[in-house]
């Protein structure tokens, strides 16, 4: 191996990337990427592996809908869904209380939709009852978009209640679950989700580079009824139905090594079992938040809406001018990477990603130790011992009635 690349790899091995994606990747998943590269168009064994990976994702999403794996980061799935379903003049409802919810609205506008936004503040979950009242006075919508977990603010929305309301009004739904899949409860069919979008680099802890999505029969039918052709090729989901689903031919060359890794990550997630996996994420989330409270940090979202996969804290006013210096110091001196945020939360929020391979007790404690030492270095007074609070919360049973993240 090239000495520079080897040195880079060794530095990464010694450090902890505790961010909300990309997450750390297990040795087993990394080893899968080193398998020989298949010819995806000619090798039937690769096609079988691709189908098996899709079947595993169906199980994780609890859906009988078709699942596709696309060669591109999670954002590819979001835009492909909009490009394939939205035509100029379509009425689209964007449920938005964060960066990605409002981003969905922008995508729909880019494809000519007439967009209405049902909004809430970015620290509050969307309200199903308010949505039901809102829809009473609205003309019909073809499509609604919503976000399961708003990663930039560490907030989860009650999609189990929002999706049925939209279904009652005959509205197709496209849901971004990129940061929720494998960390949060998800019942795609029972909740009436038409398109569910995911990404490889979040709670499944595969390398970045793949988007995946489920497509319901109603969504396929809506694409078939379009008045205008779908623009482009790479974003055209109909090509996947016409070529892959009906003929077994890929519309373009898949990222074979990335599929190997995703297959292994999905296999590991299913082997752990859903109850154990969700409990592990909730337990780590609770412990990380207890440590943050002991450190004097305020949780950004309302506690009832806090995600299992990511914790976001409001940066204290006195530390805000040096927030990037603080994260840089934590990385360079302690080898632990904490994330800032994006959009309106940029410069106001710190984030810890405890999803997938990051949701391990020893990694959480290493993060807490680095955070506490870094805050003290920058003159912040710790009200209590974050490490002790972390350990105590990790060892205690969760109380009934807690929010999504605990």
Image (tube, rainbow, N blue to C red):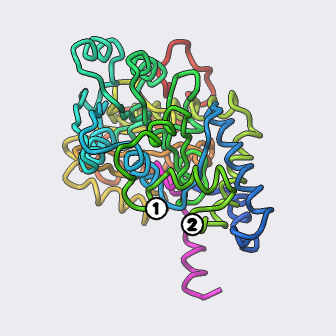
In the displayed structure image, the side of residue 106 where residue 376 appears, left or right: right
Q: How many marks?
A: 2
The magenta-colored residue range is 1-23
Q: Secondary structure at mark 2?
A: loop
- The residue at which mark 1 appears reads as 234
Neighbourhood count class around disc 2 (C-alpha, 10 Å): few under 14, some 14–19, many 20 upward:
some
Q: Is residue 195 visible?
A: no
Position in image of residue 339 (x %, y %)? 39, 52
Position in image of residue 50 (x %, y %)? 70, 55
Q: Nearer the viewer, residue 103 or 285?
A: 103
Q: Quadrant of residue 283?
A: top right
Q: Is residue 380 magenta?
A: no
Which residue: 40% across, 35% down? 147
- The residue at which mark 2 appears reads as 252
Neighbourhood count class around disc 1 (C-alpha, 10 Å): few under 14, some 14–19, many 20 upward:
some
**What label does residue 46 carry, if any?**
none
């Amino acid at each position: 191996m090239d000495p520079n690349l080897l040195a880079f790899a060794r530095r990464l091995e010694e450090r902890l990337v505790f961010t909300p994606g990309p997450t750390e990747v297990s040795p087993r998943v990394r080893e899968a990427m080193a398998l020989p590269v298949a010819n995806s168009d000619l090798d039937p064994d690769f096609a079988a592996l691709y189908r098996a990976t899709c079947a595993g994702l169906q199980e994780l999403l609890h859906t009988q809908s078709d699942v596709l794996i696309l060669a591109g980061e999670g954002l590819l799935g979001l835009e492909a869904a909009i490009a394939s379903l939205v035509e100029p003049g379509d009425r689209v409802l964007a449920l938005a209380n964060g960066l990605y919810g409002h981003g969905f609205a922008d995508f729909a506008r880019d494809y000519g939709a007439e967009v209405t936004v049902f909004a809430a503040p970015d620290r509050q979950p969307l309200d199903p009852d308010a949505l039901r009242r809102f829809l009473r006075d609205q003309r019909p919508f073809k499509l609604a978009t919503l976000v399961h977990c708003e990663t930039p603010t560490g907030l989860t929305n009650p999609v189990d209640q929002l999706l049925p309301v939209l279904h009652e009004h005959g509205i197709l739904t496209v849901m971004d679950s990129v940061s929720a899949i494998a960390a949060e409860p998800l019942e795609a069919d029972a909740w009436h989700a038409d398109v569910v979008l995911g990404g490889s680099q979040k709670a499944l802890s595969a390398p970045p580079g793949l988007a995946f999505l489920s497509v319901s029969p109603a969504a396929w039918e809506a694409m078939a009824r379009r008045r205008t052709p779908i623009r482009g090729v790479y974003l055209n989901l109909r090509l996947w139905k016409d070529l892959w689903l009906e003929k077994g031919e890929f519309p373009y060359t898949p990222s074979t090594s990335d599929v190997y890794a995703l297959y292994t990550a999905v296999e590991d997630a299913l082997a752990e079992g859903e109850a154990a996996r969700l409990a592990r994420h909730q337990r780590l989330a609770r412990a990380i938040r207890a440590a943050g409270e002991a450190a004097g940090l305020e949780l950004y979202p309302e506690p009832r809406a806090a995600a299992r996969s990511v914790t976001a804290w409001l940066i204290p006013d006195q530390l805000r001018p040096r927030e990037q210096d603080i994260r840089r110091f934590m990385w360079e001196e302690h080898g632990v990477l904490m994330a800032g945020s994006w959009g309106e939360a940029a410069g106001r929020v710190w984030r810890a990603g405890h999803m997938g391979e990051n949701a391990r007790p020893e990694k959480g404690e290493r993060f807490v130790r680095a955070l506490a030492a870094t805050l003290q270095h920058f003159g912040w007074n710790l009200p209590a011992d974050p490490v002790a609070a972390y350990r105590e919360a990790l060892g205690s049973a969760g109380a009934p009635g807690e929010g999504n993240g605990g």
